Image: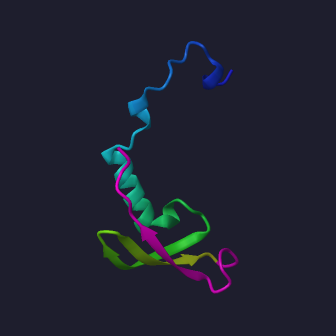
Amino acid sequence: MSPAHNPSTPPLQTNELSPSPRSGKGLVLKCHNPQLFVVEMSGCKLLEKNERGMKRWVTFREGMGPPVGKTEDDIVCYEPLK
């Protein structure tokens, strides 16, 4: 029986779904080192960073990703939802 259908599993509390400082650090790590999270990527070089986001070059493993093997990403940061 899955946890969603198990009557003995307590329901999630609203605050369990809210972002935490720990989850924010994970997102920053994923932006700086996407190859740790996406197997097709082999590297990342940060080109610029400011208060609104960052620009990076992402390199893909041979035969994966765009034909040139690299792409430029623009990542935009938004204020957390309240």
**Residue 60, quarter of picture:** bottom right
Q: Position of residue 12 (x, y in %)?
A: 48, 26
Residue lying farthest front? 82
Residue 72's spot in the image, x, y percent?
Answer: 51, 80
Residue 12 to residue 55: above or below? above
Farthest residue toward the top? 8
Q: Where's residue 68, x and y in %?
A: 63, 86
The residue that appears at 34% across and 56% down in the rendered structure is 79
Residue 75, image x and y in percent? Answer: 44, 69
- Closest to the observer, 9 or 36: 9
**Image quadrant occupied by the C terminus:** top left
Residue 75: in magenta span: yes
Residue closest to the eye, 76 or 61: 76
- Majority secondary structure in the magenta region: loop
Q: Residue visible at 40% across and 67% down?
A: 32
User: Which residue occupies 60% across, 24% down?
Assistant: 3
Image: magenta residue range: 62-82
**Residue in the picture at 40% in, 39% down:** 18
Instruction: State left or right for residue 67 relative to residue 29.
Output: right
Residue 81 magenta-drawn? yes
Q: Is residue 70 above or below residue 81?
A: below
Residue in front for this viewpoint, 6 or 12:
12
